[in-house]
Amino acid sequence: MERVLVTGAAGFLGWNLVEYLLSHDFFVEAVVRPNSPSNVRLLPHPHLRIMPLAMEDIVHLSEYVIEPCDYAVHLAWDARRMDFAAQRASLTATLDLVEVLGAVGCRRFLGIGSQAEYGMTNEVMEETSSLQPVTPYGATKAAALHMTRQCAAQLGMDWVWGRVFSVYGMYEPESTLLSYLARTLRSGETPQMTAGTQLWDYLHASDAAAAMAALLLRGRNGEVYNIAHGDVRPLRSFSEEMRDILAPTAQIAYGTSERPPTSMRPSVEKIQTHTGWQACIGFAEGLRRTYLEQKRFCVEQNVV
């Protein structure tokens, strides 16, 4: 049985990836922040081993590893995107992680980057597009891409990078637009939005997990891949589809938000061609799974 080490395993993307890997016969070494309330999401499983280790202490990972892992997926990253010190610390911890993984015999490293690496552009975002990040988060993710690629090469470890775009699903952060829309629509309030003319792309977390697994197994060494759905359309189309499912008689106030509209047009041709992966969950089905079934799931599992 192949072993996968996952950092940030109790987070939004981490939990969804762990669930996918366990259901596909991998053994998962789950690195989680000690005493995090989110750790209760990871229910006991015979092929799951929890390693409570903060990223600032990741240099001690070798003390926790019992058997070498075949793969590692690095998801842990500080959520304070505009905090220079926090982002610098995440970059440092990421480099420490790659060095330790090389020392304990990991064969392949998958780093998870972000659409923020591209910066603000209305052009199609291809993996070869220039990187012009406009936030500390985007800048350090871009730096991590280049530095971990060099470090992994020196250690003789395979390296792949996946740039995640807008993902939604189980345990989605409350700060996202879709979470905001779901809360306001259900409460009977009127959501405030931009005109909604900007282009966007939404990927369900289950599909994102499958994409990451595909990159682990079939991504080409040294390559970067966008992880997105490919269903690019005006943001207003997504919000109205959500309204129709959650609160058909509700209204959305377009053009009332002062946030500047920025389009997002990711290309997914490369990941589809190299790995055979493609998104399977349409937006309507994803909404039902996330906002109609998620509450029932959390109650049944006694998890919030």
Image (tube, rainbow, N blue to C red):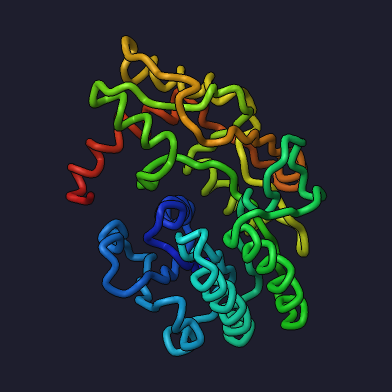
Number of marks drawn: 0
- Report the side of 257 relative to 160 (left or right): left
Instruction: Where is residue 213? Give x, y as percent.
Output: 58, 53
**What residue is rendered at 46% in x and 80% in y?**
56
Is 267 on the left-hand or right-hand side of 95? right
Residue appearing at x 65%, y 33% in the figure: 263
| Residue 248 lies in quadrant | top left
Q: Is residue 26 visible?
A: yes
**84 over 218 or under it: above or below:** below
Query: Which is nearer the eye, 126 or 194?
Result: 194
13 over 191 or under it: above or below? below
Coordinates of residue 141 in the picture (x, y in percent): 63, 62
Residue at the extreme top:
249
How far from the left and from the top, in percent, is residue 108?
65, 69
Note whether residue 110 is visible.
no
Image position of 164 (left or right of 169): right
Q: Tell me the residue at 30%/63% (across/down).
A: 39
- Residue 60, given in percent of the width and then of the height, sits at 46, 88
